[in-house]
Amino acid sequence: MTNSKLLSASALALALVAAPALAQDMLKIGMTFQEMNNPYFVSMQEALNEAAADLGADVVVTDAGHDVAKQISDVEDMLQQGIDILLLNPTDSAGIEAAVHAAKAQDVIVVAVDANANGPVDTFVGSKNRDAGYLSCKYLAEALGGEGDVAILDGIPVVPILQRVEGCKAALEEFDGINLVTTQNGRQDRSVALGVVENMIQSHANLAGIFSVNDGGAMGALAAIQGSGRDIKLTSVDGAPEAVQAIADGGPFIETTAQFPRDQVRVGLALALAQKWGARVVPAEVPIDVMVVDSENAADFSW
């Protein structure tokens, strides 16, 4: 047998021996989302899949559907599958704590994304949600010339939504002529928000502006405003493609403070990998900036 054939045979034998070890050592990433019926989280999953493909990693993704019991069960299933990294987008920050402890008990690296979780999370990566609410409501108040009745279209009481409302109220309080006349829950859902805002408009004859805590609710609010024929300005948080297009088209929807879901999951995964590869100093929290999107820049903006 020639030297080249000997080398080829040796290489093949080495590959056959190494293959099971390589397969066994393949990085496995689990990510559980609070919901997947939202373009925001869909774009986050797309970015995760792209990053995992570059890494040659295996990915397990689940949708909790805003059910914390299901999310805990999903995490338990992932742990049985031997994940190395858990990217956690909690539907209930307190309720998911037991799952965080279970993951850490198996030496899994846990990074909370978009919303933080109770328990020994290694890192939290999320938007500056208070800033987002503040910027959006300041924009609304200024667009109204600092005067008028406004409403808040609230959502599910998870930490990011609570922070957006907190920021919004802080901004509105800076304008003596702005009156917050009602806060109602549209559950971040287009169809629910449509009915809620229709009732808002009927109940408040002088309503001049609405802030929605997310773009899903804002699209329902937009339909209600358009159906009423009233001159009511609308702002929101997220930067979803449909909302950005509505702003570019002109009309009642005048601004959304955009987040960067793809960047959140990329940064979260990078920090998890750094820790897996031996980094001893990893930040406990990484806030991701937000950006105002209005008619001036909507045409050029995308997640």
Image (cartoon, helix red, strand yellow):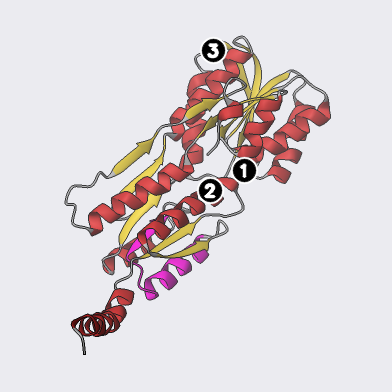
Residue holding disc 1: 188
Spatial separation of the CA atoms under disc 3 and disc 2:
36 Å
What secondary structure is the magenta-colored segment mainly? helix
Residue holding disc 3: 175
- Residue type at the position of mark 3: Phe
**Residue 188 location, x and y as percent?**
62, 43
- Residue type at the position of mark 1: Gln
Q: Is residue 16 magenta?
A: no
Earlier-in-chain disc, 2 versus 1 = 2
Earlier-in-chain disc, 3 versus 1 = 3
Mark 3 secondary-structure assignment: loop
Q: Residue at x 37, y 71 (%)?
A: 79
Q: Where's the N terminus, which quadrant?
A: bottom left
Earlier-in-chain disc, 3 versus 2 = 2
Q: Which mark is residue 165?
A: none
Spatial separation of the CA atoms under disc 2 and disc 1:
17 Å
**Residue 243 location, x and y as percent?**
64, 34
Name the foreground residue: 292 vs 228: 292
Q: Compared to 273, does 140 lie above or below?
A: above
Q: Compared to 7, does 117 lie above or below?
A: above
Residue holding disc 2: 43
Left-right relation of 145 to 59: right
Region in magenta: 68-88
**Residue 198 location, x and y as percent?**
77, 34
Q: Residue at x 47, y 67 (%)?
A: 74
Q: Nearer the viewer, mark 3 or mark 1?
A: 1
Label 3 Cα crowd, 10 Å radius (few <14 / some 14-19 / many 20+): some
Label 1 Cα crowd, 10 Å radius (few <14 / some 14-19 / many 20+): many
Q: Is residue 75 magenta?
A: yes
